[in-house]
């Protein structure tokens, strides 16, 4: 699924930031954290004004026409050859793995391919391209990493989260059982097949809890709202956060309390 | 049903043409990647390593292996027959090894049987009264711990399948690293395949009951390999 | 086929029952965990990616020459005395088998494991024709005793634990109730031994059919396959037309992949290669061997370059072993011969999209299946493709699968059009999202299936775009 060999660009002066609709609407703090982390690396972050959604919801449901309708005007938001960084494994995967095929045989084919080639998941970019060095000013905490299926299999970044967390000396990384098993979000799956999804998220949340995690982090807002929403409803002791928000907080003196399930204030 | 045959082949040919003609910008047609057999062919094992690996693999699934000198296998077989309380042994009439054995046999040893009649004539006897059989082999495969058997008129198919104990003679210098090597070096395609060719890699087993292994289902419960060195 | 098609419609209720059944949940969890671990260990000392690449190449090469290879296979088999038959549908294939049995006045058929014979519902057909068809593979035998269908393509009785099997055998065959697997197995062996001896005809499947040498290859552990194909005087092998490979050497990577992917075994006890009936001087083996080539929707799949990847499948079952949905609902919930991921991409072609529409959405597209497929079938991609077919969702690429458009419902289409309207117009998007943020307090507390298990998602007070705009204005000292 993911590229056999990734060829990372050298560290650029500028990047395009593609926030994704879930970050924009539900977890803007994650987006802001991502931008601030990039700026901390000395990179100028360009936020294309007309960005909306990567098109994945329609595409996954088989509505390619509507997906293309939404993606097409956005393809021209990235005219320069800068990397496009995305704070999401699943949206990154959509752009990198599926844009070329969606636009094959259309006048936008080469534009879509160009965008796909330059798309990077943000934590992967920070680690591999920026060689980010983090500091930990927070309290000791046990954290589980939830790598989403698309981060793992479409973007090939399963090792990135643990490596970044490993740079934080007050963070103890715990591993949950069956870490590679899907959390059951799957977009509309959670609603269309609510019972199966419920069974899957239950297992995932319990595994994270049973690993002794007080907190879990992930690159994907869908997984986040899924697992954290379940944990909250079931009054489980652990909380979830987007990994970018978490990393940014740990860099600040007197780290803030972790964000709760719902995201925004 | 030759109309069915024609219809199926026609549909396949039309389909293949359609695949090739699909939107050229996005169609790769039938782009077939190169078949690189290195991964199933190249192994750098010595003869000793191959024998060790063969033994390890077949023993891991309850196969029994006894290494014997090439001219000293008969006493070992006799010992095993006694140990396993086997009262009769079905074996070839014509193979060199069988002739040697028959030659050296004597009356107070287990009864020697022949598969001389077609199975229809003695099916019940074979299924119910034969304790063990002895066959030759065409070598073995180290990687999977498999014996190669080509049953023939003299060592028929049911001989290595029905009796609950199956003894096999294997020459240590006939062990191949991989299946690919065995079939290439023995020239299976050039020779033409026999009625039945087999790889036998242990006694019969199943894991159908809650994935718990049980041995001796329909094939032999014991597979005993005499490796002639 | 009709009983199966009806069965599929009841997917949701069956899923519910399965999820609520602690025995099913625990049997499958335990079984799948074990199979996943074993598979992983079995590939430890392999360059797995190179092996999968070779497996995929071998299958694609065979598919690219499928009509020629079928002709070559037929010619070589016939030269060696095997009779070859072609069936366009499962029913035709059943007729062929029945006719061969009738021609030989055969009353008793013993069967080796064959998924295509399940697809054809052969046993039922033969029973109606007055011919007893007994399954000899232990898992299939148990499933037949229970009057069920297999719940997994490799381990048919995987949904049952030892206690359940003990009860079943006690009730149907009079064995003692026992937790001793050896005892239960020995009992089954004894029960079936007589049947092998008495059977007039043996029916088997085929794992690989080699065109180059006219050889039918079968893998098995128990020995029932060899007995089925050797003891009766007539052997009928049935196979889907896609199981052909070009050369004998092509079998070597596929065999290495099949047994390890399926059960984590480096090889099965027996690998059985059959190329002819009993020759004049031979003393056992069937005097007649038949091969029935079954199309049953496969040549239709072959018409599309993307969909034909479905035909690469070597029926290992790894996809379902790794599927989080299959693990929780088990094989019977699907209601199809082939469950799990391969079932989802294959059954729409065999039964039509109308009858399988509920199955397509029952996946998160997690990709665990595609990651383990030994021949690299891009299963999630094919699932998305079939979803598109089900809704006729791509005007640039006309749908081809039977029953396409069945799920294109006005309401859902309207919803996606509305979604597209909002997201294709950035100004409208910004406007809508800001107002949604402001009015987030009005969001309903109950959101269908979502809130049955979770708290509702909470919109942020300000969207990121809003916050960035303000940040920009502060920087430039502008007015808000």
Image (spheres, coloured by chain):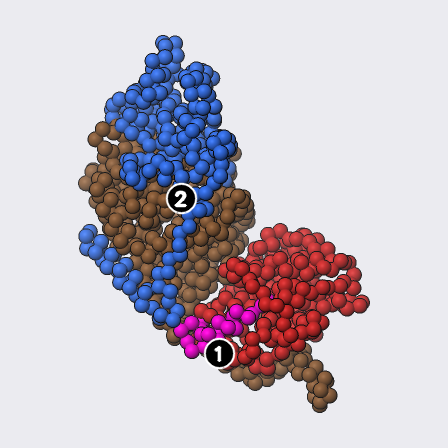
- Per the image, label 2 sits on a secondary structure element best described as helix
- Per the image, label 1 sits on a secondary structure element best described as helix
- Mark 2 vs mark 1, foreground winner is 2
Residue at 32% across / 64% down in the picture?
B19
Q: Specify the farthest residue to the bottom.
A: C479
Chain shown in brown: C
The residues colored magenta run: A102-122
Q: Which numbered marker is on residue A81? A: none
Q: Is residue A234 visible?
A: no
Let me know if residue C212 is in the magenta part.
Answer: no
Task: Note whether C97 is above or below B163 in the view shown.
Answer: below
Q: Is residue A112 visible?
A: yes
* Label 2: chain letter: C
Residue, disc 1:
A72
Residue at 27% across / 23% down in the picture?
B122
Task: Note whether A247 is above or below C429 in the view shown.
Answer: above
For the image, the number of numbered tags is: 2
Q: Hey, which quadrant is residue A48 in on the image?
A: bottom right
């Amino acid at each position: 699924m993911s590229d056999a060999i990734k060829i990372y660009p050298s560290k650029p002066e500028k990047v395009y930031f593609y926030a994704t609709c879930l970050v924009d609407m539900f977890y803007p703090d994650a987006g802001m954290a991502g931008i601030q982390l990039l700026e901390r690396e000395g990179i100028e972050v360009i936020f294309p004004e007309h960005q909306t959604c990567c098109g994945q919801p329609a595409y996954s449901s088989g509505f390619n026409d509507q997906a293309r309708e939404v993606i097409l005007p956005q393809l021209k938001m990235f005219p320069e050859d800068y990397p496009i960084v995305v704070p999401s494994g699943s949206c990154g995967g959509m752009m990198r793995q599926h844009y070329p095929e969606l636009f094959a045989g259309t006048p936008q084919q080469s534009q879509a391919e160009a965008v796909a080639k330059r798309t990077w998941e943000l934590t992967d970019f920070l680690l591999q391209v920026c060689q980010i060095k983090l500091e930990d000013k927070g309290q000791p905490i046990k954290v589980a990493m939830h790598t989403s299926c698309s981060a793992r299999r479409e973007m090939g970044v399963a090792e990135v989260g643990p490596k970044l967390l490993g740079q934080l000396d007050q963070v103890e990384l715990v591993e949950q059982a069956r870490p590679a098993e899907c959390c059951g979000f799957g977009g509309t799956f959670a609603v269309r097949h609510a019972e199966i999804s419920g069974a899957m998220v239950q297992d995932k949340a319990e595994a994270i809890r049973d690993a002794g995690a007080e907190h879990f982090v992930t690159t994907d807002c869908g997984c986040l709202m899924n697992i954290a929403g379940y944990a909250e409803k079931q009054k489980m002791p652990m909380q979830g956060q987007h990994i970018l928000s978490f990393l940014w907080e740990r860099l600040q003196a007197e780290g803030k309390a972790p964000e709760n399930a719902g995201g925004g204030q | 049903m030759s109309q069915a045959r024609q219809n199926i082949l026609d549909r396949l040919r039309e389909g293949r043409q359609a695949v090739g003609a699909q939107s050229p910008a996005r169609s790769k047609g039938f782009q077939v990647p190169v078949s690189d057999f290195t991964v199933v062919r190249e192994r750098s094992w010595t003869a000793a390593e191959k024998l060790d690996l063969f033994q390890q693999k077949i023993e891991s699934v309850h196969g029994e292996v006894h290494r014997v000198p090439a001219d000293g296998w008969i006493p070992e077989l006799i010992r095993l027959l006694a140990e396993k309380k086997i009262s009769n042994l079905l074996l070839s009439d014509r193979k060199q090894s069988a002739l040697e054995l028959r030659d050296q046999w004597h009356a107070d040893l287990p009864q020697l049987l022949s598969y001389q009649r077609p199975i229809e004539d003695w099916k019940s006897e074979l299924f119910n009264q034969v304790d063990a059989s002895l066959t030759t082999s065409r070598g073995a495969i180290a990687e999977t711990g498999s014996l190669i058997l080509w049953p023939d008129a003299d060592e028929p198919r049911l001989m290595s399948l029905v009796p609950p104990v199956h003894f096999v003679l294997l020459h240590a210098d006939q062990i191949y690293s991989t299946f690919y090597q065995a079939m290439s070096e023995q020239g299976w395609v050039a020779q033409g395949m026999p009625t039945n060719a087999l790889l036998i890699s242990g006694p019969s087993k199943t894991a159908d009951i809650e994935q718990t292994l049980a041995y001796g289902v329909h094939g032999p419960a014991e597979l005993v390999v005499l490796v002639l060195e | 086929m009709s009983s199966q098609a009806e069965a599929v419609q009841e997917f949701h209720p069956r899923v519910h029952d399965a999820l609520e059944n602690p025995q099913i949940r625990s049997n499958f969890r335990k079984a799948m965990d074990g199979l996943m671990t074993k598979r992983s260990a079995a590939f430890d000392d392999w360059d797995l990616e190179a092996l999968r690449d070779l497996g995929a190449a071998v299958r694609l090469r065979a598919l690219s020459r499928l009509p020629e290879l079928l002709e070559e296979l037929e010619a070589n088999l016939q030269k060696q005395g095997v009779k070859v038959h072609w069936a366009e549908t499962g029913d035709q294939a059943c007729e062929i088998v029945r006719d061969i049995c009738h021609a030989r006045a055969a009353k008793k058929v013993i069967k080796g494991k064959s998924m295509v014979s399940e697809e054809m519902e052969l046993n039922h057909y033969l029973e109606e024709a007055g011919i007893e068809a007994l399954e000899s593979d232990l898992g299939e035998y148990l499933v037949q005793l229970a009057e069920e269908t297999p719940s997994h393509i490799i381990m048919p009785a995987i949904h049952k634990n030892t206690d359940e099997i003990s009860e079943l055998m006690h009730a149907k065959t009079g064995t003692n109730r026992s937790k001793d697997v050896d005892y239960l197995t020995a009992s089954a062996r004894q029960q079936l031994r007589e049947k092998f001896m008495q059977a007039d005809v043996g029916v088997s499947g085929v794992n690989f059919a080699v065109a180059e040498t006219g050889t039918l290859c079968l893998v098995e552990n128990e020995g029932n396959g060899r007995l089925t194909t050797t003891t009766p005087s007539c052997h009928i092998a049935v196979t889907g037309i896609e199981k052909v490979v070009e050369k004998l050497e092509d079998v070597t990577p596929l065999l290495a992949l099949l047994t390890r992917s399926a059960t984590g075994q480096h090889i099965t006890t027996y690998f059985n290669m059959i190329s002819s009936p009993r020759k004049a001087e031979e003393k056992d083996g069937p005097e007649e061997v038949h091969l029935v080539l079954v199309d049953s929707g496969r040549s239709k799949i072959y018409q599309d370059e993307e969909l034909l990847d479905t035909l690469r499948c070597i029926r290992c079952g790894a996809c379902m072993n790794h599927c989080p949905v299959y693990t929780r609902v088990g094989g019977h919930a699907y209601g199809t011969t082939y469950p799990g991921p391969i079932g989802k991409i294959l059954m729409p072609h065999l039964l039509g999209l109308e009858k399988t529409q509920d199955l397509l959405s029952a996946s998160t597209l997690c990709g665990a299946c595609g990651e383990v497929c030994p021949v690299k079938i891009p299963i999630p991609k094919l699932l998305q493709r079939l979803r598109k077919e089900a809704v006729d969702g791509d005007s640039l690429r006309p749908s081809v699968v039977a029953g396409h458009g069945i799920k294109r419902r006005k309401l859902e289409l309207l919803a996606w059009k509305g979604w597209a309207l909002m997201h294709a117009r950035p100004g409208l998007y910004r406007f809508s999202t800001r107002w949604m943020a402001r009015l987030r307090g009005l969001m309903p507390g109950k959101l269908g299936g979502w809130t049955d298990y979770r708290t509702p998602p909470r919109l942020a007070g300000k969207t990121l775009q809003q916050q960035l705009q303000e940040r920009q204005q502060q920087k430039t000292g502008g007015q808000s």
